[in-house]
Image: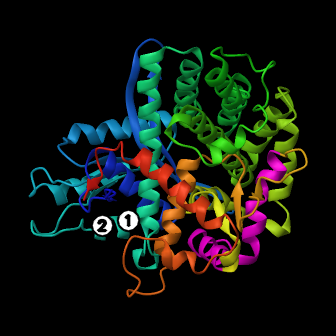
Amino acid sequence: MTTTKLSLSNIPELYDYEDFLSAYLLLGGYALDRSIPMKVDNAGDIFEVDIISHQFLPDRDNKMLIEIKSRGWSIDDIFKVRGWMDYLGIDSGVFICQKKIEEKKFPLWQEDLKRIKISLLYNGKQDPADSKLDMNEVNGAFAIDNSVFPKGALSSIRFAFHAERCMKSKVSQHRKSTHLPGLECLWDYSNDIHDISFKSPTAVSRLHKTFDIFQKYHHLSARLDYEKIHGSFPDAMSCSNFESGRVKGYILADIDYLPVCYSLYLDHLLRMYILQCCVEYIVSPKEYKSEFEKTLQQLNYSSLSNNITTGITYLKNSNCSHFFHYPRLWQLFTYMMGGFLLDDMLTREYELLGKVSGVPIDEVPVALGVFDILFPLENSNWIRNIGYTNIRYLNMMPTQLLGIGANFRRSYYRDDDTEKGESYEALFKKLSGDYTCRNLLKWNQSAYNILSLSKDLIRT
């Protein structure tokens, strides 16, 4: 049986275009909040912000609100961005379009919009015959040098964002067809996480929101698994852990496990939000910090508030001199590398992650250890070895994203252009461990299964 190859478009549109620019900015130096909906109770989505980018520096967070249009737009759309900026307290905005309207006026608009702190950028083709988008204006505005992007990294992150959207879409379909209470709860969890930035425009209010969500959806992944097995949806007090032997299924899962895998992904997203709040606190002005510290003292939902205080102290010590890069490092570890490391390539893995994130190679293990401080596990670290393999993976990482990381390694560790083809054969010659290669193949298949649901990918 011939397997269909899934490829990315060089001229992406709609959500695929948002994925492309998100991946490009992440590699280019920016941590991201993506696809942020503004909701009103019983009224659904009013609008959605495509990206809020963060450029964390030792003493500040340079935020930008970014709107992306692959098709038609009007000048009214740009002034809506100005309103969103005011609502969210963000000083700078960027409007990126693939198509120019009224081409003669376009340069005038670009100049005039600077008065309201919005950059209008063209990101289409320079010539109709071009097979790729012109990135010059984006590179200039964001100070990006795409020549240093690692081989296969942009595609890997785009595939990961595709997988995320496909997971959410499939869960939505399953929820509508079954009306299971656990899936309704999972859908609410997804919505609550994705609108944190709108409901909570400051780090203090975001921390409040993340604690509320943590409490509301505690142990949801295990509870969803219980519902899958037994048909009833338990509360968090009566079901706090997976049943014996069940966790392995989510490391080597097929699409039947998708709701639990999506819940595990949302758990991970929430942890990354909390890390980002901690970094924002450290780089914030002094007058802001007293409010943040008061908030921490008031949060008594669980030991998590004490862990956050400990985590902030950890991030401020001399071993974490590049702590302001950690939120982006974790996003790159998640979406580019799939949340795992290959022991046989460990030095190269650290070098790669350090080079792309801006964290020195000696500090990369420190950055990857921050989850152990913020969210300590009993008798284990967050990044652990899988038995009979030479793989270190992030505990409870959904298999769909592990598969994205597997596919990335196949491309990245190809030595030269003589190693053609789509097989893993060249990579496997470099690896050891009885089940290392077998796991990578199973993860790859899981990623393929979810990506095959995407209408944006090219099939050959």
Q: Which residue, given by chain and number where applicable, does mark 1 sit on?
A: 141
Q: Nearer the viewer, residue 241 or 190?
A: 241
Question: In screen coordinates, is 411 left or right of 382?
Answer: left
Q: Say few, some or many: other residues with alpha carbon within 10 Å of mark 1 (under 14 / 14 to 19 / 20 or more).
A: few
Question: In screen coordinates, is 46 left or right of 327?
Answer: left
Q: Nearer the viewer, residue 217 or 97?
A: 217
Task: Give me the residue at 40% from left, 74% from top.
Answer: 146
Type of the residue with mark 2:
Glu
Above or below residue 179? Residue 104 is: below
Above or below residue 228? Residue 405 is: below
In the rendered image, residue 105, in percent from the top left (x then y), is placed at 12, 54
Q: Are marks 2 and 1 in contact (CB under 8 Å)?
A: yes
Q: Residue furthest right?
A: 379
Task: Give me the residue at 67% from left, 63% from top.
Answer: 435
In the rendered image, residue 297, in percent from the top left (x then y), is placed at 86, 32
Above or below residue 397? Residue 315 is: below
User: Which range of residues does the magenta coloring cover?
Assistant: 348-375
Task: State the image quarter where residue 271 is shown.
Answer: top right
In 3D space, how far apart are the residues under numbered discs 2 and 1 (Cα atoms)? 6 Å
Q: Which labelled disc corresponds to residue 393?
A: none
Q: Main secondary structure of the magenta part?
A: helix
Label 2, secondary structure: give it: helix
Task: Give me the residue at 60% from left, 54% from top.
Answer: 61
Q: Residue furthest front?
A: 1
Question: In screen coordinates, is 145 left or right of 250?
Answer: left
Q: Which labelled disc corresponds to residue 137?
A: 2
Quadrant placement of the N terminus: bottom left
Quadrant placement of the C terminus: bottom left
Answer whether residue 43 is visible to the viewer in this image.
yes
Q: Residue furthest top?
A: 42
Task: Give me the residue at 70% from left, 52% from top.
Answer: 279
